[in-house]
Amino acid sequence: MIQLPQKVAVGSAHGKLILVGEHAVVYDRPAIAIPFPLIKVKATIQEIYGSIRIESEFFHGPIHSLPEKLQGIAICILETLTALNKPRTGLLIRLRSTIPLGRGLGSSAAIAIALVRSLYTFYGGEVRQTELMALVHLAELHAHGNPSGIDMAAVSSECPILFQKGKSPNPLQIGAPLHLVVADSGRIGDTHAAVTSVRERYILNPARIQASLDRIGWIAKDSRAALSLGNMELLGKLLNFAQDELIELGVSDKGINKLIDVARKAGAMGAKLTGGGRGGCVLAIASSQAHSKVLANAFLKVGALQTWNFSLEGMR
């Protein structure tokens, strides 16, 4: 393999957190998602002779040898080249990510966005948001089957958003610092099983599940107001209510519930799972940056694989 190092381009994207509204967003209720700036993906494009090759921690080799579960990446790359009217050859694509896979933190959407951005940069173009979302949607279809679109909207946004299927995301204002702690349970979330569980419960008892989904939608709207006012105590209570509904939907589990219970006992204003559930991550609202460290230590003591803490403020 001969490399032509004179031409290189880079694209990147950050992770995301769903503050409130997971699962209900699939059923057309509103949800709030926020950027997770501490975890990122970087895609680097370089000219080479021969076929397109991928270098990453999860795969090394030609694009046509990508395993089935990673075909969304191949689709995203090839369709982007088609959109750019460029040949499907002669590229070395390096992917570097600090977003844990399968934790509900937007890894697949972030990888796709970083790829599209890097390819457009490589060929001297600027991708419009509508083009970006259309190309990333192709990858998300393969990764998630019937995605709501919240992941790709959130990982491409620099501010919190209110998201609802079929509508343009609305940027949200934060009226006071929001101190968040995220804990990785160490278990890959089983999104497929969680989504299936909600669907099965919906079929068996539509009135009950419809009511639960409605309550999550109302919680999301009230959470938007609490964020805007900077009332983090109210926001924490709303997140606790949302977690109750996620338990009702059958998408939480003992491991997640344990982490949430520990956070609340350590003084979290609110705590809930984030993402698909059945593993993955939880988030908690701390009262200050100092309190964030207390919550992080509490998570680690009961077996969390890793934690992150950061603050959002003054965003729109």
Image (spheres, helix red, strand yellow):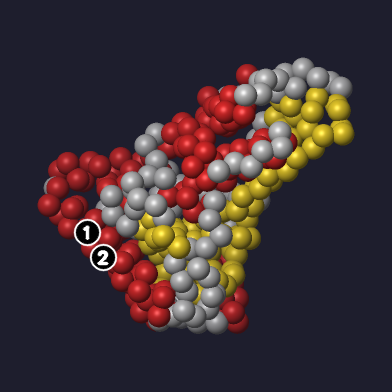
Query: How packed is label 1: few (under 14 Cα within 10 Å), some, or many (20 or more)?
Result: some
Q: Secondary structure at mark 2?
A: helix
Q: Is residue 56 above or below residue 279?
A: above
Res 131 visible: yes
Q: Which residue is disc 1 drawn over?
A: 214
Q: Secondary structure at mark 1?
A: helix
Image coordinates for residue 170, horizontal then vertical, percent: 41, 60
Q: Amino acid at mark 1?
A: Asp
Q: Is residue 236 above or below residue 99?
A: below
Quarter of the figure with the N terminus = top right
Mark linked to residue 224:
none
Image coordinates for residue 57, horizontal then vertical, percent: 69, 38
Q: Is residue 34 above or below residue 280?
A: below
Residue 307 quadrant: bottom right
- Contact (Cβ within 8 Å) of mark 1 with mark 2: yes
Residue 171 quadrant: bottom left
Image coordinates for residue 145, horizontal then vertical, percent: 39, 34
Q: From the viewer's side, name the closer residue of 131 and 190.
A: 131
On screen, residue 47 versus residue 87, left or right, reads right
On screen, residue 98 versus residue 302, left or right, reads right
Image coordinates for residue 73, horizontal then vertical, percent: 57, 32
Residue drawn at x 33%, y 64% is 220
Q: Amino acid at mark 2?
A: Trp
Q: From the viewer's side, name the closer residue of 8 and 25.
A: 8
Query: How packed is label 2: few (under 14 Cα within 10 Å), some, or many (20 or more)?
Result: some
On screen, residue 173 versus residue 300, left or right, reads left
Res 105 visible: no
Label total for image: 2
Separation (CA) of disc 1 from disc 2: 6 Å
Residue drawn at x 48%, y 32% is 138
Mark linked to residue 218:
2
